Each structure stands twice: as structure tokens, then as C-alpha cells.
Image (cartoon, helix red, strand yellow):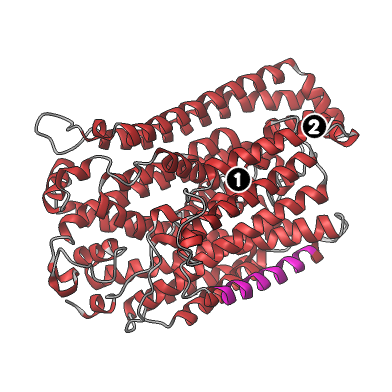
């Protein structure tokens, strides 16, 4: 076994930091490894390139619109790549490929579940988001409702999602870097935090978008290269690949059909709901729709993003299948050379081992660098979304009542991103030894139960009132958090109790209907004069949602 | 000022017709996706064997593979179909409604 591979020989963090908890076993602690210079050199190139872009972007970031939304000057294709970049994480590459490697067809089912939200976002949300929004999704929910209350609610939803998701990414980054690069945990967390704050503070949305685009291309390119090299060993013949995979796998022909992973219908449907509608409520994804100049480009971005995500999932599945044969039968990738025993580096390593098997240390180093770059890009997007919620929603519209200047707003935003960066690094280091597998499930649960119901109701239902929106959001948030805390992943795994209070780990099937029901009930019972006015204002909102007339314009430059 | 224009657009019969058509179209497509996706999930939960059937006599490839890949491809094509109709029909109707209202 070569030196690099032995350096990888420790338990890898689970897919947890970007996959929902159900796709992830516990987050394993990793051992710090010797330095991997291939990976570090390639990552250094990526960092230099992105810092160059940030410098270039800083010179173009003058107004609040530039800072928050890249002046609306991003094209549909660029934004599509950036959205795909936000969605395809290092965990998708490592976690999903390892799921296919161990479970076969079940992994494919997860890929399809991850993917199915995109057409819905296209049909029901993309255009209206673009036509109604300016910088944050609270611009849409507060369009005809009370600015202060609804924006505060939306900001709470955004910040909870951002902070939880950031902690999960930070811990994942620390574990990954310790393993792949051989750097200490804290230094990885600090590097990620510092770079994230630099991208966001100086380059705003323009820099964040380009970091995301570059990363998406690297991830697609790297994954495709590994897949093609591996698939060539099977003569690019599917039947041949499947036959050899079945012969190599301990479960044999069972890997060609659904297994035990989704046998419980409640969990299966709850996961589907949480993923589908959670994605449609993630603030950093929603924010991407305000960077394009009009609805035509917004539609195009979803079309491109859907293509990239779908293609990438197919690549990941083929990688997992090829790894069954190429990695699974090679004793060099297992502890003690026992192919029935533990894989070197832990359960999430098939994709990395496959890269090494078909492309040597260079391809392995490249894929490691791409994985780190991926985390950086995702945290930058998250930090920007959080900073915008603080400055645009809380500071400018709630505290200053819309009377602050653009300059002040951007300054507050930059300070907020610094604050979020410090907070994320601090919490990331604090949480090193904690099992954070629940965090991602929680993030998606909150996004699906707090952000999404208010957003979709405010766009489609005339009857929604301020009270209904606020109460619906609170109920969604509280019930999602309560279910996750009382379920096995926190109550037993983190808090150390004997048995969970609530039997299901996925909150969406319960908390989402609760949020919708509360919002509907409170709005219907709301007979105040303000409620009547708010319902009346829906007619104008609908015209703008449909036509984009009066929508926040494109860049002046 | 914009409220007046919104009022005019809202009263434009072609706009009203477009909104109804677009709503029907978007919800129909969404329903197709939701029904296909959740049927797939329910087949996975209740009839997993159906997806494991070999694609042809003696094949290793199961019917689940083309069905899964087909879902991914079909959903993507649906988004393309939506764009085609939105770009041509809906955007034209919108542009005309705005033009008439601002004249």
C-alpha cells in the first residue's frame, strides 16, 4: 500500500455534515494523519484562485444590491451551476457513493429522493421567488404582511438553519481535513472560518457565486473523470458492471433491488417530505434566485441545476457500483488485507479509494482538494445568507424601519459575517467530540417546517395574515426542534438517555402539517382590519408574481 | 402609481386567462412529479420485489435501474417542457398585459 493510502487509514467522518441524519451513521472521530502534499498543493491553488476572484469581485461590489445579489447580474447558466454547487457537497460525493457501495439499489433511491425537489422548485417557486424577492426570502413573506413581525420570524428561521448547518459543515471540515490533509482539527476549522469571512466580507455575493461555480465544475469534472476511468474497466457496459458487482458483493443479487433501508413507510415518506421541502426552504439556496436579472434566467438556472444534480447523482451511483468490484475485491484497501473486514479510513472511503485505484495519488489528491473546496463554498453561501438576514431583515427593516442607508446596511452585513464566522469557528471547535449527526436532519426539518410553509403560503394563499404566518412559523420551528430533541438521535445518542421519547427521527411528516394547519387556522380566525387589508393586497402581489412588473431590477453595470 | 398599473393588468382578460392556464399547468406538472415520486417510494416500501425483477430473462440488470434513471431523466425533461411553454406563451401574454397597462 502506498504512503498516501496509509495516511488515510482512519475512520472518516460520516456523510452527516451535509446529508440528513438518515443517510449518515454516527460521525466518527478521525485520527490526524501525515501531511498529504498533493492534496494541500492543489487546495492551495484553489484558494489562491478564489482569493483572486474575491479581489476582483470586491472592486465590483459597490451597492447593497451588488453585495447581496451580485447586482442581479448573474446569468441563468452561471446561477444554475452555483445552485448545483450549493446542493452537491463533499458528503454527496463520499456519503452517497459509500451508500451505493454498501447497500446497492437503496443508495440509488436516496439519490432520487434528493433530486425530486428540483422540478417542484421549478414549477411552483422559481419565477415567483425572482419576481417578488430582492435580497432575502423575507422580502417575499413580508410583501403584504407586517414587515417587522414577519421579517423577525423569517430571520429567526434563517439564522437557526444557518447556524446549525454551519456547525455541521465546520465539524465535517475539521474531521475531513484531519484525515485527508493531515492538519490538526482546529487549524482546519480556523482556515475554513477565515476564508469564508474573507470571501463574504470583501467579495459579497459576486465572490461567493464564483467560488461556488468553480467548485461545482471541479466536483463534476473530478467525479466524472473517476467514473469514466472506472467504467472503462467494464467496457462501458452496464450489464457487465452489474454482473461483476453482484458477483463481488456479499449480498449478491439483492443489491439490484430495494433492501431494508427504507422499509418503514412513515420514515420513508417523512424523509422524502423533509428533503423535498427542506431544500425549498434553505435560505442560501433561495437567495440564489435573487442574483439573476429576471424570471427567464431564474427558470434557466433551475433547469441547469437539475441537470447537474441529476447527472452527478448518476455518476456517484456508478462510482459506488464500480467500487464494489475495483475496491471491494482489492485487499490493499482493507485493514490487515481482509476484504471482509474494515475498509481503510472507514466506511465513507469507497470514492476516495476508487480514485486512487484508477488514477493514482494525483487523482486522489485532486479529489481530496475538491472535497475541501466544496465545504468552503457551501459555508460561504451559508454565512452570506445569515449575514443578509441580520443586516437586511433585522437591522434595516426591523430596527431601523427601512430608514437606514445602503452603506450602513452593507457595513452591518460585513460585521455580521465576521460575527457569524467567529461563532461558527468557536462552536465548530466546541462540537469536535460531539455526535452531530442529528444537526443536518434538524436543519432540513426546520427549513421544511418553518421557512417553507410561510413562504409557499404567502405566495399562493390569499388568506394568509401576519398572525397566521408568525404562529405557523413558530409552531413549525418548535415542533421540528422538539421532535428531533426527543428522538433517538439526540435524546439517546447525545444526551445519553435509555430510550427515545418520540419513536421517529424525521420530523417533517409531523411538523410540516402542524405548521400549515396553524397558519391556516390562525389566519382564518384573524378578523382584524389589518388582516382584511393584507388579504386585499394579495391581488397586487399576484400581478407582480406573475409578470415581474415592478420587481427588483438587474444591475446597472 | 404601480398599484394603478397592477389594477389595469389584473383586469386584462388575457392576463386572467394566462394566470389560470399557468396555474393549471404548473400544478399539473407538480402533481405528476409528486405522484410518480411517492408511488415509487411506496413501491419501495411495500413491493420491493417488483423493482428487483430482472430486466430480461437471465439479466442481472433489474427493472428498478431503468425506472430510477427514467425518473431522473423524465423529471428533468418536464422542467424543460415547463420552460418552453413559459418562455413562449406565458411571457408573451405578460409582456402584452404590461404594454397595454402602461400605454
Residues flagged by tags 2 and 1 on a common chain: yes
Q: Quadrant of the N terminus of chain A?
A: bottom left
Q: Chain of mark 2?
A: A
- Please determine whether, in this image, residue A395 is positioned above or below residue B103: below
Residue at 48%, 56% in the rendered image: A500
Characterize the local packing of mark 1: few (<14), some (14-19) or many (20 or more) Cα atoms within 10 angstroms.
many
Q: Examine the rendering and report whether any part of residue A74 can be seen.
A: no
Characterize the local packing of mark 2: few (<14), some (14-19) or many (20 or more) Cα atoms within 10 angstroms.
few
| Residue A460 pos. (x, y %) | 68, 32
As drawn, is A375 to the left or to the right of A264?
right
Q: Which residues are magenta?
A: A409-427
Q: Chain of mark 1?
A: A
Residue at 39%, 66% in the rendered image: A370
- Please determine whether, in this image, residue A207 is positioned above or below residue A254: below
Tell which tag, 2 or 1, sits nearer the viewer. Answer: 2
Q: Which mark is residue A525?
A: 2
Amino acid at each position: 500500500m502506498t504512503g498516501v493510502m496509509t495516511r488515510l487509514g482512519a475512520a472518516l467522518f460520516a456523510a452527516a455534515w451535509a446529508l440528513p441524519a438518515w443517510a449518515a451513521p454516527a460521525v466518527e472521530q478521525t485520527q490526524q494523519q501525515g501531511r498529504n502534499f498533493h492534496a494541500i498543493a492543489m487546495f492551495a491553488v484553489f484558494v489562491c484562485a478564489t482569493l483572486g476572484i474575491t479581489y476582483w469581485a470586491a472592486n465590483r461590489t459597490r451597492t447593497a444590491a451588488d453585495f447581496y445579489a451580485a447586482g442581479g447580474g448573474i446569468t441563468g447558466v452561471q446561477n444554475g451551476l452555483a445552485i448545483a454547487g450549493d446542493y452537491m457537497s463533499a458528503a454527496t460525493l463520499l456519503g452517497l457513493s459509500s451508500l451505493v457501495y454498501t447497500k446497492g439499489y437503496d443508495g440509488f433511491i436516496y439519490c432520487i429522493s434528493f433530486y425530486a425537489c428540483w422540478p417542484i422548485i421549478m414549477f411552483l417557486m422559481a419565477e415567483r421567488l425572482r419576481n417578488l424577492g430582492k435580497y432575502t426570502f423575507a422580502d417575499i413573506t413580508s410583501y403584504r404582511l407586517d414587515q417587522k413581525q414577519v421579517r423577525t420570524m423569517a430571520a429567526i428561521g434563517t439564522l437557526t438553519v444557518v447556524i446549525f448547518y454551519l456547525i455541521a459543515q465546520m465539524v465535517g471540515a475539521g474531521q475531513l481535513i484531519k484525515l485527508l490533509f493531515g492538519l490538526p482539527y482546529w487549524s482546519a476549522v480556523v482556515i475554513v472560518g477565515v476564508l469564508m469571512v474573507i470571501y463574504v466580507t470583501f467579495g459579497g455575493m459576486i465572490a461567493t457565486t464564483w467560488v461556488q461555480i468553480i467548485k461545482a465544475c471541479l466536483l463534476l469534472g473530478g467525479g466524472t473523470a473517476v467514473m469514466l476511468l472506472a467504467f472503462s474497466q467494464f467496457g462501458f457496459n452496464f450489464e457487465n458492471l452489474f454482473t461483476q458487482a453482484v458477483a463481488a458483493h456479499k449480498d449478491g443479487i439483492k443489491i439490484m433491488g430495494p433492501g431494508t433501508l427504507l422499509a418503514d413507510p412513515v420514515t420513508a415518506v417523512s424523509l422524502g417530505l423533509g428533503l423535498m421541502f427542506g431544500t425549498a426552504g434553505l435560505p442560501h439556496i433561495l437567495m440564489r434566485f435573487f442574483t439573476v436579472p429576471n424570471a427567464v434566467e431564474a427558470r434557466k438556472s433551475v433547469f441547469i441545476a437539475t441537470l447537474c444534480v441529476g447527472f452527478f447523482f448518476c455518476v456517484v451511483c456508478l462510482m459506488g457500483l464500480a467500487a464494489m468490484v475495483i475496491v471491494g475485491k482489492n485487499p490493499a484497501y482493507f485493514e490487515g488485507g481482509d476484504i471482509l473486514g474494515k475498509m481503510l479510513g472507514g466506511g465513507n472511503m469507497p470514492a476516495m479509494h476508487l480514485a486512487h485505484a484508477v488514477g493514482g495519488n494525483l487523482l486522489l489528491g485532486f479529489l481530496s482538494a475538491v472535497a475541501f473546496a466544496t465545504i468552503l463554498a457551501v459555508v460561504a453561501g451559508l454565512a452570506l445568507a445569515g449575514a443578509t438576514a441580520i443586516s437586511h431583515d433585522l437591522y434595516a427593516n426591523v430596527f431601523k424601519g427601512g430608514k437606514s442607508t445602503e452603506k450602513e446596511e452593507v457595513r452591518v452585513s460585513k460585521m455580521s459575517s465576521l460575527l457569524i464566522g467567529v461563532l461558527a469557528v468557536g462552536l465548530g471547535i466546541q462540537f469536535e467530540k460531539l455526535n452531530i449527526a442529528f444537526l443536518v436532519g434538524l436543519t432540513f426539518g426546520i427549513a421544511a417546517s418553518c421557512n417553507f410553509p410561510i413562504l409557499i403560503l404567502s405566495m399562493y394563499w390569499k388568506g394568509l395574515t401576519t398572525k397566521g404566518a408568525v404562529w405557523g412559523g413558530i409552531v413549525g420551528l418548535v415542533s421540528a426542534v422538539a421532535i428531533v430533541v426527543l428522538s433517538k438521535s439526540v435524546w439517546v445518542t447525545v444526551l445519553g438517555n435509555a430510550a427515545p421519547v418520540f419513536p421517529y427521527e424525521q420530523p417533517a411528516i409531523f411538523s410540516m402539517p402542524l405548521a400549515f394547519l396553524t397558519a391556516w387556522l390562525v389566519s382564518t380566525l384573524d378578523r382584524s382590519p389589518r388582516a382584511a387589508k393584507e388579504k386585499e393586497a394579495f391581488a397586487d402581489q399576484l400581478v407582480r408574481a406573475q409578470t415581474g412588473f415592478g420587481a427588483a431590477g438587474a444591475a446597472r453595470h | 402609481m404601480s398599484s394603478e398599473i397592477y389594477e389595469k393588468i389584473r383586469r386584462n382578460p388575457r392576463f386572467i386567462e394566462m394566470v389560470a392556464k399557468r396555474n393549471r399547468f404548473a400544478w399539473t406538472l407538480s402533481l405528476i412529479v409528486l405522484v410518480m415520486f411517492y408511488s415509487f417510494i411506496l413501491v419501495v416500501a411495500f413491493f420491493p420485489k417488483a423493482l428487483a425483477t430482472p430486466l430480461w430473462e437471465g439479466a442481472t440488470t433489474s427493472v428498478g435501474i431503468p425506472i430510477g434513471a427514467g425518473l431522473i431523466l423524465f423529471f428533468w425533461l418536464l422542467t424543460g417542457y415547463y420552460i418552453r411553454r413559459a418562455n413562449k406563451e406565458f411571457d408573451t401574454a405578460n409582456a402584452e398585459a404590461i404594454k397595454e397597462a402602461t400605454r
